[in-house]
């Protein structure tokens, strides 16, 4: 963390519209976890199960729920908030603003921005970005280093694009022509709603025809692949290493765990949670949590079970035969 | 899609060497799916199962097979072609040429090209590419932004390399030396045949010794990892997020679904299809379709089955015991 | 391989502190596998199972263990070393030095290095790298093209960072605020020990608070995702396409196979090996080899077994019922 940040507790409480029990002039330098906090730090109790970590808390102040007001050791200033984790999120934003008061040049001179691209006044474009012809970037967006925005791609307001993001590369489309692949030129677009964040080296492909769409508030982690003509609903979140194949349609407020794969042309309705590393092979038309992964085991046990698994269909037949025999024997 | 493209139906029919039923002077502005087409658009019926979408078709013209000539609504011009999907692919190429008549500077001034690299006259090198010493790039190849071609890498004709592709980074090779890793310098090369296309942020590693080879017509999607000394046969296609470990040898005309993993030193013969997210743990010596993934289920059902799965070997033993008991009882 | 390297066998033996049986003045141009070696090449017998490849060996010299001294064909010079594979690794390093005597400019003029970054004298920074404010890079480190080192990231000595590596992008952290995601600014750091190597397009995220740490000698392949606040112990090795979710703690000397996923907040102790494509869903507190992947099968067999698998819990109940019946029948 950059040294030099000092924020009065009164400013913190005011930023959170929170009640402060303690010294409003106490200076806070850092946000820290309960167990790592030192004098000058502010910690936060995001769940009751961490209560024991308050015992040895060495920081100066703590974010707590009014329900847990009595738990902090004596002498620790308390900032009372209903949703501690959300308050912690908002404080990190306050810290960021104090740390980086000026973001430097708006468009880094090393970026390559096509003259026909439309970039709003309040956009930050990092070093060595490439913005191709006709691209549009909404106000308040921040593009880190090495981001590539392809021809005609449209980005909403307040996007955050981490290094190496590629928007608008060709979707993967070919037609067979006597045993060889004939390229289907990808003539469509990529459209990002407002408040979309994309992790490092994540790729969103251009549609074959029409648009690939990430709606408002979609958050995507690093190294994620979004195929052509995919549509992802508002406020859905995808963890790292996920792959969404072409033309899949994912609803709003979905959560997809790291390394999961969604096959092409499927539909997933709103409020579906996919566990990490699971493979979605059919449409999901009902909200809920879905899982499909082979449970980890020590290698010896796995080998035995994996061998049996390949016999599973025959085991089923043997059970059926046993049941028939037993039925006959009983008669 | 860039506005302003207008192509006469007669040119379309001539490009496809197809019969036209309708007005040769009708101007087409866009290719569109059957359900999204508007006046001025051309749609295509790539499969009989979409016939019902023709009923409300609002476009001006349609690509259809001569067998389905009667299916288009009255007033819709028809372009008759035997293989509609292939004709659609070829039309997208015509559109691309009309949209981008000039590709701009051949080598973007921001690209860093080593003086000893050999770049054919007709090659397009995008902004901020890096072409290292001794690399060779064949005629007609197009490198998008941020592509990195390592020292001595050889690329055939008409390659398409999307943003962030890395060719010729070191393969992952180390020898243990008293509990620490000693680097095996990767002294080999990467060789790409003609007509290879690689998706955004895909990596093809340099061989330890010898060559990593992608043969003619290999097509690879985004975020794919190709390890050192891998060889992939002509016209094979790999979908996004695939990983091919070192020294694997994959035949011609193979198809590997998204997120699949192929372990190292394996051989896969020609015409093998691997389902998405499957893990290839042994060589495949017979053409066909292969699969290995845990079927998705709602989380509660998955948990029950996963728990039973870890007992599978014992279940098998219990069935065996039951069979023995029953046999004894019958005797 | 770059032509023009010629190294005397005496220099090779001396570099390896090895006994030479044969002509010390014989010139070696290339290291090659036993089956690809030609006159002027040096091969190596890394395992007894390759003995038959020595029969037709056409190279000039071979690395062998003293135990296998008699196996080489007549006229082939022998360099005797206890650990052939390790000696091969060290020879590749000798070759690399002969091939690339000068690495060119230390900091490529196209790189964007913030004036407040601290770069040791002996560091190589490749074309179009971005080094942000306050970053620190230890002596002897080599950054290839397009590497991005975020604000304040600290890199130890002799790091090797392949093209497209991203260090210090934001971790994936958000708090729910009335159905929308509130960003948790990532205020922590990334710290790399000495001798860390990271593959192409691999990402290591900045900690939320505190540090994401890769200890001394960690080696990571291409397209790997390391989440925020992860800690990886010394000399652990991760193959391509691996994903490590936030706050996971991995011990020393671990090996994680390609495509494996480790869920967040888990602990893995020292000397654990995770098989490729396995998913770690719980902490591993005992050294050993762990696996969890669905065995590959031809698609028809897989479909049958996958269908049975979804009935597995019921099969278990049916076995239990059979056992109860049988017990009753026997009584």
Image (cartoon, coloured by chain):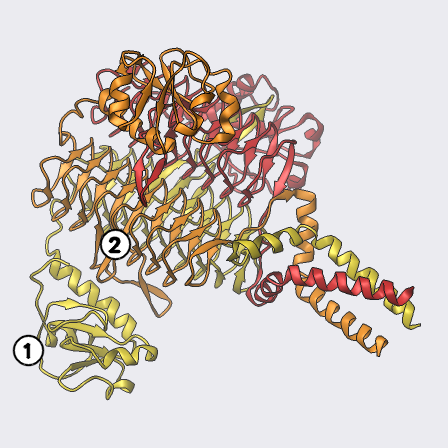
Chain colours: A yellow, B red, C orange
Drawn side of residue B286 relative to residue B97, left or right = right
Residue B73 shows in the view: no
Residue C44 shows in the view: yes
Chain containing mark 2: C
Front residue of C216 and C103: C216
Residue sitting farthest toward the bottom: A70
Drawn side of residue B115 relative to residue B149, left or right = left
Query: Residue shown at 47%/40% (left/top)?
Result: B242
Counting from the top left corner in percent of width and height, residue C249 is at 33, 59
The quarter of the image holding the C terminus of chain C is bottom right
Same chain shared by disc 1 and disc 2: no
- What is the number of the mark on residue A25? 1
- What is the number of the mark on residue A258? none
Chain containing mark 1: A
Total marks shown come to 2
Is residue B122 shown above or below C211? above
Q: Which image quarter: residue A92? A: bottom left
- Image marks 1 and 2: residues in contact by CB distance under 8 Å: no
Front residue of A325 and B252: A325
Query: Residue shown at 53%/61% (left/top)?
Result: A290
Label 2 belongs to which residue? C213
Foreground label between 1 and 2: 2
State how far apart marks 1 and 2 are (Cα): 35 Å
Front residue of A29 and C104: C104
Secondary-structure class at tag 2: strand
Within-10-Å neighbours for mark 2: few <14, some 14–19, many 20+: many
Counting from the top left corner in percent of width and height, residue C53 is at 50, 21
């Amino acid at each position: 963390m950059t040294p030099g940040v000092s924020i009065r507790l009164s400013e913190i409480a005011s930023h959170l519209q929170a009640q402060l029990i303690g010294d409003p002039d106490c200076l806070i330098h850092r946000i820290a976890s309960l167990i790592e906090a030192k004098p000058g730090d502010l910690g936060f109790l995001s769940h009751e199960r961490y209560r024991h970590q308050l015992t040895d808390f060495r920081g100066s102040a703590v974010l707590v729920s009014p329900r847990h007001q009595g738990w902090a050791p004596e002498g620790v200033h308390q900032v009372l908030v209903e949703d501690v984790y959300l308050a912690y999120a908002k404080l990190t934003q306050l810290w960021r603003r104090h740390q980086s008061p000026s973001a430097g040049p708006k468009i880094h001179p090393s970026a390559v921005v096509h003259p026909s691209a439309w970039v709003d006044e309040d956009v930050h474009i990092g070093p060595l970005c490439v913005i191709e012809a006709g691209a549009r970037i909404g106000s308040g967006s921040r593009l880190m280093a090495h981001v590539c925005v392809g021809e005609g791609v449209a980005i909403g307001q307040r996007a955050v694009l981490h290094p190496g993001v590629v928007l608008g590369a060709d979707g993967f489309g070919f037609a067979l022509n006597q045993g060889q692949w004939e390229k289907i030129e990808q003539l469509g677009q990529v459209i990002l709603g407002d408040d979309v964040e994309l992790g490092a080296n994540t790729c969103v492909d251009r549609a074959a025809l029409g648009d690939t769409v990430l709606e408002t508030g979609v958050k995507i982690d690093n190294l994620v692949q979004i195929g052509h003509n995919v549509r992802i609903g508002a406020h859905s979140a995808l963890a790292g290493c996920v792959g969404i194949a072409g033309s899949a349609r994912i609803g709003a407020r979905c959560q997809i765990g790291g390394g999961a794969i969604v096959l092409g042309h499927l539909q997933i309705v709103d409020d579906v949670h996919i566990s990490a590393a699971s493979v979605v092979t059919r449409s999901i038309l009902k909200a809920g949590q879905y899982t499909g992964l082979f449970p980890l085991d020590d290698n010896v046990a796995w080998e035995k079970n994996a061998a049996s698994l390949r016999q599973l269909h025959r085991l089923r037949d043997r059970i059926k035969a046993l049941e028939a025999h037993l039925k006959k024997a009983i008669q």
